[in-house]
Every structure is written in structure tokens, then in C-alpha cells.
Amino acid sequence: MRLCLRMVFLTSLLILISSSLWSQSLHFQYDDYDKKVYKEYSVESQYVKVTDGTSLAVDVILPTQGPSRDAFPTIFIYTPYGRGFIVPHMGLAKHIGSTALGFGWGPTYSMVDLVKSLKMMVAHGYAIVIADMRGTGASYGHQIALMPKLGEDGKDLIDWMAQQSWCDGHVGMWGQSYLGWAQYMTAAQQPDALKCIIPEVMGFDLYTTGFRPGGILATRWMEGFSGRLQGGNLNVLEKKPIAMPTAPVIDEDGDGKLVDEWPEFERKAMLQGAFAPRYRDKASRDSQYYYQATLDHLDNVWVETFLDSTYQSIDVTGGEELGNINFYKVGPGYDAKKIADTEIPIFHIGGWFDGFLRGTAMWYATLAPYNPSYLHLGPRFHTSFPKAYQKYLEYDFKDTYGEQMAKERLRFYDRYLKGIDNGFDKDAPVHLYVMHEGWREEATWPLEREVMTPFFLGESGLTKAPQKGSNLTYEVDFTAYGGYDKDSSARMIMYRGAPSNVMKRTTLDERCLVLESEVLTEDVEVTGHPLAHIWLSANQADADVYVYLSDVDEKGEAYYVTDGQLRAGWAKMYDNNVLAQNQLDVKPELPWHGYEQAQWQDGILSSGEPVELTFDLLPTSWKFKKGHKIRISIAGADAATFELNPTICPDGTLGSCAETTYTIHTDAAHPSRVVLPIIPSGPQEQASR
């Protein structure tokens, strides 16, 4: 009897242990407890009407060739860049090449055909819905770029999904950049079926994390971004057929093909009514859905209209229908309180070299008290992780960064859309990659054990105490560049993708005022938000100050770590809670300079007295190795990326710039310094993994 009882007890214990192990997964590990049981998928394109009657183009992708299932948890991707694509002129060789690359035969492609991680989601039993925003792709209507109305449309679409037989009522969202913005704006509308979101590389406000970091217009980024939106959404305006226009929705001629629903090359006059569109198959179309949708897009108000909006609160007019919006309203953090009220889980994903990084950190720190929140910061750029950095950052993993992140997204969705107790919510909430060390788990962001350590600027370089001696003088070189040697990339040119080379600043720093620490006698980890305090006077009434943090190795090569900037007229600081309508405590407590017209100080440097400029550099997590040096470089311009200061360069050209001298004050009363968040060496709260 005792033997039988022992056997029953041991069997029960083994089952319990086995069940526990089966349900737990680890960071970057997917144990396939929910097998890849679906081998194929179906794609159906259709129009869905939102509340105001506008028809939006939608693709519904459902798993097939697997277990019979009435309904699936659903992942919603909401985009201005095209929910699917066609290649209008595709010969046999291209069809074969496309198939060999795993994209399918073509010439019509769903986003799932092109994105490996989405195929992974479908294989694990997720439906996917991809929609073109109004005024974009094959959708009807028009928009002001980034207007809140797009979030209302997102809610309408989720409400529609919840009523479909193929949806089990659990919807999550995914996407990066503009698609991340769409998630926050949709979540703020509080649709009942939305259970979780994964916004990647997106800002909290769009003034400082997108358009005007430090109050300085990011011209190259904004012009490129606006051009991409316009080029992709006025498909029939092109003088030459673009390679992959957005896929049509309706097979109007009934021949089973969508590719021929895209008009052949036509001139702009076609959209002005000079002549009707022509189609490759010569067949007539009565409704001309794609063409009519494109006509609606001509009324769009594009991002370029924001380029002249110097101040945070100046409205951009969209007419009676679209209303007025400003930088406050297009910032997804504006309605952060509504997202907090939903209490939905949020997986915030950012990159150490992404231009929106400050916003990713702010989202996590602000919402962590309210929503189940997770933060993942890796060595990626806005769009990708470059192979050049795999070796330099000692990123030695079996899978690629993209494959690793696909597993993390799947773990998150399994937990919050399928309800699988896989341990995701029991992990540490913060995972960050310490450059030159590896992945680490943390309990908070910023790290509670950080020690804000000042490095004072002076004739001796960077020191731990203020220096006696003369102030520093810098003759501004207006050709200075904030990018990287041998590459035209920079952090704030996000549409360009990752640089092709490791980011060196060795020769570029020759155009800057350069200060270095002594050779480090031990490894130094900097993890958090560096702060700059620059006491500045100049022979001009205003100035722009750019600060770069670099790592100098034993050979004297300087490698970019992070940077920040501020226009002097914005020197005063204000409460950043205004970004969330003063309804939440916006964290971390970083310098915020208002950027309202009334807060601008015209001619701030005219008196010749030093003015303190306090601003943060974008966050980082970097190990400076023993034998290296910490470098601070200061510049007065970055003409290749940002606008030139209009006070100094009135025509906006290098030739119009007046000779400019900066004085960096270093005396005890004006101690210019950069404060770095140093992580003490020794035992840590969380072990490296």
C-alpha cells in the first residue's frame, strides 16, 4: 500500500515538474510547446468601412493545412507603407528567383510572403490582418500625416475583426516606427478586443524624438520621410512604374489577377482628369477602385507641412474635415493616460542606435506603474542590425538578431493572446544589451544602482573635478558632421537603414572641440541617460551645440556611442508632464525645454554672459574597456543632417554662415561637464546572460 502511495506521489510530482518545464520558455528561446502545425496560409483582400464611411484596404491572412480551428488569435498590422505589393512587369526569371528566395511566385505579395517572422506567427496558429491607413496604399480617403483620426480608424478595424468568425476575440498589434505610432494611437481609443501591443522604435513626443531634436529641424530625415510617404501613396503619379506599388484590392475584370488592376504608366495629367487611366490588358473598368482611391490621396497633408512649424503648439490646418493638429497631438504620448487606463500588456522594443530611442525609454518608464510593461533594448538601428557590428560588439549568438526577436514576440503573444503560462511575465521586465559585454536582465529603467558621475571639461580634457585655467575656445566648423566615417549615414537619417561600416568618428572629430579622459585603468560601464551641462557664450546671438560621446581605443580610433543637441534659445527648462496633458508623471525626469513660442528666448547670447545649456544625450549601455579613453566632442553644426542655425546662417546655406566662436566656460562658477550614468563594478542585482 505504501509502495503504491509512493508511486502515485512520485508520478504526480513528475507530472507537475514536467508540466512546469513544458510551459516555461526563456529569453531568446522558444521551446515549440505550441508546435508549428500550419504549413500554409490563405490571403483575402477586401474593403472595410470605418465609422465615417471611408473604405480601408485590408488583407486577412489565415493559417491553413493544419488542425481544424474555427477562430484564431489575431495580430493586427496597421501601415501607411502598403499592406501588400505587386510587381507589374515580372518575367519568368524574376518569378523563379522570387520562389528561390522564399517569397513565392508573385507577382502579388502579401506582407506575410516577405517577412519571415510573420510566417512564423501564422505557422503557430495566428491570423494576421494588415490594413492600409486612410489616404495610403489602396485605401480611400485622405489624411494629415500622423493625425489622431488614424487611431480612431484603428479601433474601428479591431472592432470589425472581433465580429469575424475567424477571430477569437483576442487581438494584438505589432510594427515599428510609424506602425509603432499607430499602435499607441489605436490603443488610446481603448478597443475591447485589443489585448496587447508590441510597438518598436517609436518616440513619446514627435517634436524632440522625430522632427526637431533639441529644437533643431532634422531636415534630412524629415524630407526623406515625407518623400517616402508621398512616393508610396501616389503610385500612378510616377513617371516610371515603381518597382513594387501597393497591391490593389478588387479584381474588377474578374480574371483572377490583381496585378493588372494597377494602371500602366500614366502622367500626372491623368490624375488631373486630362485622360482616363489605361490598363495593360486593355480591358475597361467601370469603377476603377485603385485609381479612385489614389485620387483621394491628392488631398493628403504630408509631413513636409510640419517643416515650418517651429513651435510645439502651432497648428497645421487640415481643413474642416480633418481639423487642426500640432506637435502635441501627433505625439502618441499625448493620450498616454488612456493607454494606462487599459492596463493592456506592452512590449516596448528599441535600439541603442535608433533616433527614437529616448521615446522608447520614456514609454516604458512612464507606463510601467500601470500596464504590464517590458523593455527590450538591443544593438539595432532604426531598421536593422548591421553585420558590421556583430564582431565589433562581440555579439556572438547562433541566431540572427531578427530571429531572436521573432522568438521574443511569439513568447509575448503566446502569453497574452493565447493565455499560455510560458513564463514570459515572470522574466525580468527589462532586457538590455551592454555593448562589449552581452545581454543582461534588469528590474528597472533607469537602473537604480546608476551613479551619475560628472566629467568636467577643461584644458586637461575630461577630469573628475573642475579645472582651474582658461576657458575653452572653439571656432565653429560648419562642415562638421554627426555621422560616421566612410558612410553617409547618421542616427537621425532613419529611412537610410543601418550604416555599412562600424561607426567611427576619428576623422570627423577633427572638425570638433575634442576632450578626452585619461586612459582607463579598469572597465567602465555607462548605462542610462548621459547629461550635458555646457556653459556657453559666443560672438553670435544664438548657437546650436552638438555633443558626441565616443570610445577611443588603444590605436586612437574613436567609435561613436551616443549624442545629443540643443539650440541655445531653448535654454530654459519646463515640466515634461505637459507631453501627456499633465495626466501622468512622464519619466525619466529628463531635461525638457518646452518649445512653445512664448518659451523661446530670442538673442539669448547677445549680452556676452555665459548661459547654461542642459540637455540629455540619447541613452546607451556601453562598456568602455580598460586601456581605452572616454571622448567628448563638441560641434556647432551638422549641416548634412540638421538645419543650420538661422540666426548665424540666414540663408540656410554654408556660404551664408557668419564666423562664429564659442567659448565653453570651465571655472568653478560655470563648470561645464558631461554627467555619465556609471554602473558600479562588482555583484549585480541581475546576472548577465
Image (cartoon, grey):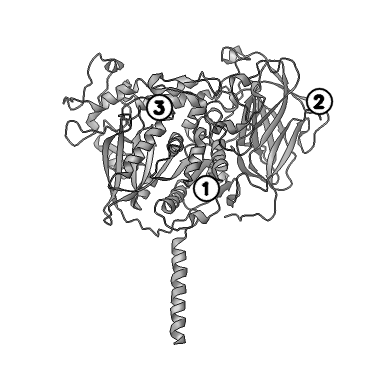
The residue that label 1 is drawn on is 374
- The disc, 1 or 2, on the residue closer to the chain's N-terminal end is 1
Question: x and y percent of residue 54 in the render?
Answer: 31, 29
Amino acid type, mark 2 = Ser
The residue that label 2 is drawn on is 470
> In this rendering, is residue 389 above or below 634?
below
Which-is-in-front pick, marks 3 and 1?
1
Badge 3 element: helix
For label 1, count other residues whose C-alpha is less than 10 Å away and answer few (under 14), some (14-19) or many (20+). Answer: many
Name which quarter of the figure residue 510 lies in.
Answer: top right
For label 2, count other residues whose C-alpha is less than 10 Å away and answer few (under 14), some (14-19) or many (20+). Answer: few
Question: x and y percent of residue 176 in the render?
Answer: 45, 38
| Residue 521 shown left or right of residue 304 in the figure | right
> In this rendering, is residue 530 above or below 271?
below
Report the front residue among 332 and 388.
332
- The disc, 3 or 2, on the residue closer to the chain's N-terminal end is 3
The residue that label 3 is drawn on is 229
In whole angstroms, how far apart are the C-alphas of marks 3 and 1? 30 Å
In whole angstroms, how far apart are the C-alphas of marks 3 and 2? 51 Å
